[in-house]
Image (cartoon, grey):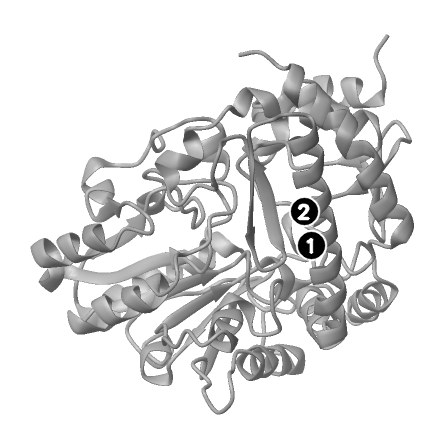
Amino acid sequence: MTDRNDDLFSAARAVIPGGVNSPVRAYGSVGGTPRFLASAKGARVTDAAGREYVDLVASWGPALLGHAHPEIVAAVQEAASRGLSFGAPTEGEVELAALIADRVRFGEIRPVERVRLVSTGTEATMTAIRLARGATGRDLLVKFAGHYHGHSDGLLAEAGSGVATLALPGSAGVPAPIAAQTLVIGYNDPDALAAVFAEHGQRIAAVIVEASAANMGVVAPLPGFNRLIAETAHGHGALMILDEVLTGFRVHPAGYWGLQAAAGEDYLPDIFTFGKVVGGGMPLAALGGRADVMDLLAPLGPVYQAGTLSGNPLSVAAGLATLRLATPEVYATVDAASARVSTALDAALTSAGVTHAVATAGNLFNASFRASAPSDYAEAQAQDSFRYAPFFHSLREQGVALPPSVFEAWFLTAAHGEEELQLIEAALPVAAAAAAAARP
């Protein structure tokens, strides 16, 4: 007997490639039928068959305050009443750009002087790379194995996220000359960073790096590594692009850069990219950085970027409401909830005798089924990933929704209250037993 999710997936596969509009949603690595979500409120989501789950996906990060926060919904509704899209400047996008720039600070240090709004994280990173090439007059880009920066052509070599889940080295359809402009090196490897600049330094436009890797599982930068990237790039006349599409405004009011700055790690990226939280769940992303670099974008400079829906008023309204509501108290609440769940996760897997490590980066975390937390892509892949599918399905059957891939971060929200946290804590031991019983 099928339920509404089975029927919808069958219908979807008839008209949508793979039945989904983003690959990881297909449950390819965990098996079973994807849950088609019908609604979400606070810390919970409801699928098309009417089943409710405590959510640990949070729309892959944007729902920092919880789903359908009433003030965010009201802001979007109010904006919609004035029109859905104008293709013209609006007051709201000026306010949002200023708010982004103001939040990315530590004391008097404010590395974001200009902001350009776009619609997706892929568009933000693509534009940042074009901008870096325009600023330096160089072609080569350095990225790290396992880091995911969207699906533009030059960025899919040894990428994380869905590419890691599908175990693909890259993507068909990317011309070899374009792929050759991206140099992929190991993450958290100072020697590899030094070597690539020693060989290609005069041709490298930029290094792009996730502020903390979170698309091959959570893999935080080793102490001083982000600073080393900045120093190495700048020493060779290249730029540093800090990708905060996932971490930006989720792990700290000033993003992961702000979290590191508060811990005493001082470095200055040239370009930041933001997404997810910055749009409050609506399609919106941004890039920002030094004025002399950002002003190379058209119409002031020769680096072209455009978008009919860039700065869409509904997305801007959601982003403004989210960032204004994301107070220090919100971050304290999310941090505490994340610490509590990650501790319970570690305890449950330990009690069940499952080899594992819980990796964290701010309030992001996940479990790797290996003896120690990974520090790079090769280590992230070298785990007993077969244990994740039964673990995932056990939690889902108990009413807890996890990301459908072992290579994704878990997300808590400010709406996860005592009832939701207790439900998760009660479900974890059962899921850990399922993981322990799994066989390759």
Q: Nearer the viewer, residue 92 or 415?
A: 415
Where does the image place residue 273, in percent across and percent down from the top left? Answer: 46, 64
User: How many residues crowd around disc 1 within 10 Å: few (fewer than 14), some, or many (20 or more)?
Assistant: some
Numbered label tally: 2
User: How many residues crowd around disc 2 within 10 Å: few (fewer than 14), some, or many (20 or more)?
Assistant: many
Q: On the rendered structure, is 303 left or right of 71?
A: left
Q: Nearer the viewer, residue 81 or 172?
A: 172
Identify the residue at horizontal 67%, vertical 47% (top origin): 342
The picture quadrant where one finds residue 239 is bottom left
Secondary structure category for the residue under label 1: helix
Q: Which residue is mark 2?
A: 342
Identify the residue at horizontal 21%, vertical 67% (top origin): 232
Secondary structure category for the residue under label 2: helix
Where does the image place residue 106, in percent across and percent down from the top left? Answer: 51, 83
The picture quadrant where one finds residue 337 is bottom right
Residue 100, above or below 406: below
The numbered mark at residue 339 is 1
Q: Are marks 2 and 1 in contact (CB under 8 Å)?
A: yes
Residue 193 in sight from this viewpoint: yes
Image quarter hosting the N terminus? top right
Where does the image place residue 158, in percent across and percent down from the top left? Answer: 34, 37
Residue 327, above or below 34: below
Identify the residue at horizontal 86%, vertical 40% (top origin): 423
Residue 20 in sight from this viewpoint: no
